[in-house]
Image: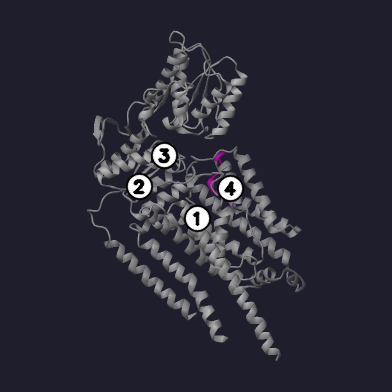
């Protein structure tokens, strides 16, 4: 029995790393200007930062579908203020606050008792509708140059710094504090968590607010880079969730972690970029084929995780049975 | 933990071998790599341009990638261009969905040593720093052709009299706006009795364009003529006029593809319409891209590029030529 368990564990640890190696090879065997990969990665750094907060939310058994809409709304608010003559820095700061505020609204709805799926599905529609209404459906571009270029920091696009910061904080909080252990406990069994005197509602509220804050931060850098475009962030929530799932965090909560998600981001980003490179030589690898690869990957990982969880549960009952005898 | 550490070591090894390996890959004599991007893939207009592009690529022996987003999305265009830069494409030719939003991506590509040109639609010249714009036809050429066709078809003693209307696409479409800006002053000046109704913007949506036309026909029983100036709007307007049985009272013309208009031209709903040779636009774009890879293009009144002669090169543009006018007699010669 022990022998078998060791094999499963080995494979399950190795599999994502093997995937990562394969995808890195896909990318780096075809790159001629490696320095330009920094630009290619910006959108994935953005998805990654969202995915990391999403991981903490999914660990509690929740989900946040509204991140794209929160970004759109923050971005439009910043664009409007900036256009109206406010300085980019103040407008950007307010954008982050707007993100935090709408995230807090999500948190409130969840705390009140709505299912996170329903609550954030509703606010996804509401925030993006509000963003479209505020800007009249038109994008806001040709903004003046900011005094401080917030899209760059020490020669790197800010998105990478945001990703690094969010990752460090999440590692610390989720894997090093009581708050993190509460997340797992809530995802495992919310009722048991409440009876163990875990502040379930407060934990949830903070997580959704954090998600909004990160969305606001990313919206700020995006707006400085390209202007406020209301429909530019559609679908980013699904990309983020895909990263979490491919990383190996259980979508029903209770199992997974931040480092796994980082691995998921790297795998998905490299596969997507690598396949795009290949599409120049092989016509059948179009955008549609890349989506299909992602779909298959998600299914395989989901089935794999489900299977592992079941094997574990079986093992546990078996162990208990042996203890009793 | 052991496993993780050893795989991490493997990873670093692989990475570094890749980085070293790809430096030696390509010699200087490998063919020029051109990346050409339409606004979106899968519509007949850009399929035709792609055919012309591949024809030129074969003649020149260049390595052409013709790829673009599946919907008219700027963000996807930017991502694909960034990836092309990393991959080592030498010249990028793009038909931007959003002339402003694409600009930072183009200027960053240029700063990494990639030559950037635009085709079909120009990007913001100052911010994008693109080298040259491959223009299908001068704006005035298309605007004049549109007015001339209408005068021939619906004019009384070479003057337009009565109610006319323009149906465009989206409000931000740069090409359509430029054509209208050239048409309207000329109409005001030369045709004072031409009463232009408010321009309609049904977006690039066939159904909406048809509805809009049907509403116009119902609201204005004395409507004389319709200019439908997107490839989607013209067949839609023609269908609405045919459904209403008003072919003899309302003269419909505009810009669209011969393949979409064949039916309406055969049955007489549309007598003449305007467009440029889309296949040749794709062909010229690749020709310009390949030429630009060697030297900057010098302004020239008439230059031969592959099978095309009399291409006008200015400081900012390479112009394909005057627009084509399609009618019953020549429409079958074109297969786009």
Which label lies toward us, 3 or 2?
Answer: 3
Name the residue: 44% across, 31% down.
B175
What is the crowding at mark 1: few (fewer than 14 residues within 10 Å), some, or many (at least 20)? few
Is label 3 in contact with label 1 (beta carbons under 8 Å)? no
Is circle 3 on the same chain as circle 2? Answer: yes
Gap between marks 4 and 3 measured at Cα:
30 Å
What residue does disc 4 label? A72
Label the magenta part by its dominant secondary structure. helix
Q: Nearer the viewer, residue A202 or A298?
A: A298
Residue A87 lies, in percent from the top left, at 54, 44
For mark 2, give the secondary structure. Answer: helix
**Residue range (magenta):** A83-95
What residue does disc 1 label? A291
Is label 1 in contact with label 2 (beta carbons under 8 Å)? no
Q: Earlier in the sequence, mark 3 or mark 2?
A: 3
Q: Is residue A138 above or below residue A298?
A: above
Is label 3 in contact with label 2 (beta carbons under 8 Å)? no
For residue B246, side relative to residue B151 (left or right): right
Is circle 4 on the same chain as circle 1? Answer: yes
Q: Which mark is residue B46?
A: 3
For mark 3, give the secondary structure. Answer: helix
Gap between marks 1 and 2 measured at Cα:
30 Å
Which label lies toward us, 1 or 2?
Answer: 1
Q: Is residue B57 above or below residue A111?
A: above
What residue does disc 2 label? B110
Is circle 1 on the same chain as circle 2? Answer: no
Most extreme residue toward the right, as rendered?
A195
Q: Nearer the viewer, residue B9 or B32?
A: B32
Which label lies toward us, 4 or 1?
Answer: 1
């Amino acid at each position: 029995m022990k022998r078998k368990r060791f094999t499963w564990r080995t494979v399950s640890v190795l599999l994502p790393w093997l995937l990562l190696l394969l995808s890195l090879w896909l990318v780096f065997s075809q790159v001629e200007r490696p320095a330009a990969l920094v630009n290619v990665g910006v959108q994935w750094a953005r998805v990654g930062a969202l995915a990391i907060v999403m991981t903490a939310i999914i660990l509690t058994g929740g989900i946040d579908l509204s991140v794209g809409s929160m970004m759109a709304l923050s971005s439009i608010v910043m664009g409007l203020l900036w256009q109206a003559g406010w300085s980019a820095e103040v407008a950007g700061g307010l954008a982050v606050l707007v993100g935090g505020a709408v995230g807090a609204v999500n948190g409130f709805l969840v705390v009140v008792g709505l299912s996170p799926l329903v609550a954030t599905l509703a606010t996804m529609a509401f925030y993006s509708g509000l963003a479209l209404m505020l800007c009249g459906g038109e994008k806001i571009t040709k903004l003046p140059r900011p005094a401080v270029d917030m899209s760059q920091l020490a020669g790197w696009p800010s998105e990478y710094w945001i990703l690094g910061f969010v990752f460090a904080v999440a590692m610390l909080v989720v894997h090093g504090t009581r708050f993190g252990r509460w997340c797992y406990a809530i995802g495992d069994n919310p009722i048991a968590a409440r009876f163990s005197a875990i502040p379930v509602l407060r934990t949830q509220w903070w997580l959704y607010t954090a998600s909004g804050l990160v969305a606001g931060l990313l919206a700020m850098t995006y707006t400085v880079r390209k202007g406020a475009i209301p429909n530019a962030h559609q679908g980013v929530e699904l990309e983020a969730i895909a990263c979490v799932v491919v990383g190996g965090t259980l979508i029903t909560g209770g199992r997974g972690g931040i480092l796994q998600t980082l691995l998921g981001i790297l795998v998905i980003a490299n596969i997507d970029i690598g396949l795009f490179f290949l599409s120049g030589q092989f016509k059948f690898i179009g955008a549609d084929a890349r989506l299909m690869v992602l779909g298959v990957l998600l299914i395989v990982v989901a089935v794999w995780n489900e299977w592992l969880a079941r094997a574990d549960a079986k093992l546990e009952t078996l162990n208990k049975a042996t203890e009793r005898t | 933990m052991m496993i993780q550490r050893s795989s991490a070591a493997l990873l670093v090894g692989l990475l570094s071998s890749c980085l070293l390996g790809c430096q030696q890959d390509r010699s200087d004599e490998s063919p020029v790599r051109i990346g050409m991007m339409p606004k979106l893939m899968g519509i007949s207009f850009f399929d035709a341009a792609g055919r012309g592009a591949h024809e030129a690529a074969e003649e020149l022996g260049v390595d052409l990638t013709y790829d673009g987003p599946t919907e008219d999305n700027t963000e996807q265009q930017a991502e694909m261009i960034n990836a092309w830069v990393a991959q080592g494409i030498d010249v990028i030719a793009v038909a931007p969905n959003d002339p402003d939003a694409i600009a930072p991506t183009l200027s960053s590509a240029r700063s990494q040593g990639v030559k950037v040109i635009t085709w079909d639609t120009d990007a913001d010249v100052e911010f994008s720093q693109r080298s040259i714009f491959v223009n299908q036809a001068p704006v005035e050429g298309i605007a004049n052709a549109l007015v001339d066709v209408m005068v021939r078809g619906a004019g009384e003693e070479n003057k337009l009299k009565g109610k006319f209307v323009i149906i465009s696409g989206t409000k931000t479409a740069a090409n359509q706006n430029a054509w209208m800006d050239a048409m309207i002053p000329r109409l005001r000046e030369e045709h004072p009795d031409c009463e232009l109704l408010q321009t309609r913007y049904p977006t690039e949506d066939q159904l909406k364009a048809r509805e809009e036309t049907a509403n116009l026909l119902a609201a204005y029983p004395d409507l004389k003529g319709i200019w439908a100036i997107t490839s989607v709007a013209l067949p839609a307007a023609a269908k609405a006029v045919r459904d209403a049985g008003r072919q003899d009272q309302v003269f419909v013309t505009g810009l669209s593809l011969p393949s979409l208009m064949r039916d309406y031209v055969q049955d007489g709903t549309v007598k003449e319409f305007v467009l440029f040779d889309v296949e040749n636009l794709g062909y010229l774009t690749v020709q310009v891209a390949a030429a630009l890879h060697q030297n900057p293009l010098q302004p020239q009144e008439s230059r031969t590029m592959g099978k095309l002669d009399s291409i006008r090169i200015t400081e900012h543009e390479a112009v394909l030529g005057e627009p084509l006018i399609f009618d019953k007699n020549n429409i079958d010669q074109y297969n786009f």
